Amino acid sequence: SSRSQSSGLGQHLFEASRATGARPPAAAMVLEAVMVCVDNSDYTRNGDYGTTRFESQTDAVNIVCGAKTRQNPENSVGILATAGDRIEVMITPTTDLGRMISELPKIFVGGTSDLLRGIQTAQLALKHRQNKNQRQRVVAFVGSPITATEKELETLGKNLKKNNVSLDLISFGEVEENTAKLEKLLQAVNSNDSSHILEVPVGPKLLSDVLLSSVIINPDGEAGGGGGGDFGFSMDPNEDPELALALRISMEEERARQAAVDGTAPAEGAAAPAA
């Protein structure tokens, strides 16, 4: 099941953070409170990303949680689900990586995602953050058609900007259909390039791999730099071997699982089947 398979990466990250004491890197990172919006709609049952969209997304959410808590130990991350009878806040922003990861398997897949209400709910949760010194950020995963209109999204973006909330959008599954609406939302919210959009169409690269080398995880935009080579993460594996090992194991497990679904050997860069 997606619930049992999706916790592997999170467990590796959790164990790595405990082993290394979750110390901050040498460069001072921004202090943030983050709400992650998870798309748990019926569309995420589709198996076009090697695994289902939901499983691929869950691994990516784990990476966001792990990266944010590593960047600054005082960063807090919360999670909500955007589909179902109502927007469900799984956990309000917390600094406890273990609690974040333990909530993901509890998310039920089904229904239609309401991105508009999901982001509005995330904004409300951030408004009530305990540490008012934290900057506010919403990271929204979009793996199904957006039901809101461009006008509604533009109004939402302007409201986020007015309240100093940054927004990262990760579009997958229905990339082409959602491009115009997400661009409109990004244009309305973006201030000093603090908000971003990452589009991940179906292809040979895993959603989590693409996310790891994006500016969303690497704020300095040095994907694969810092001595990491082709490691795909802006960190030197020699500086933090436990985390590097956890990430590498997780990526290899995901590739192996994708290869098993494809019916091929787990080759590096193996192409995913055509949608």
Image (cartoon, rainbow, N blue to C red):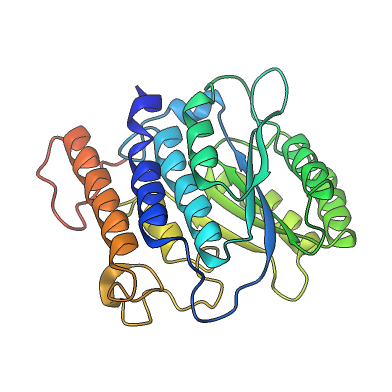
In the image, taking residue 148 as reference, residue 208 lies left or right, namely left
Say which residue appears at 81% left-offset and 61% top-offset: 188
Estimate the x, y position of residue 94 in percent, counting from the top left: 64, 46
Nearer-the-camera pick, 174 or 160: 160
Residue 97 visible in the snapshot: yes
Residue 202 visible in the snapshot: no
Locate the C terminus and report the quarter of the image it occupies.
top left
Say which residue appears at 70% left-offset and 38% top-offset: 115
Q: Is residue 6 above or below residue 150?
A: above
Q: Is residue 210 above or below residue 10?
A: below
Find the residue positioned furthest to the left. Answer: 265
Q: Is residue 96 above or below residue 163?
A: above
Say which residue appears at 49% left-offset and 59% top-offset: 67
Locate the N terminus and report the quarter of the image it occupies.
top left
Nearer-the-camera pick, 130 or 123: 130
Estimate the x, y position of residue 6 in percent, counting from the top left: 38, 34
Q: Quadrant of residue 118?
A: top right
Estimate the x, y position of residue 44 in percent, counting from the top left: 48, 30
Estimate the x, y position of residue 143 in percent, counting from the top left: 54, 39
In the image, taking residue 255 as reference, residue 226 lies left or right, namely right
In the image, taking residue 3 as reference, residue 178 lies left or right, namely right
Say which residue appears at 62% left-offset and 52% top-offset: 179
How many numbered circles are shown? 0
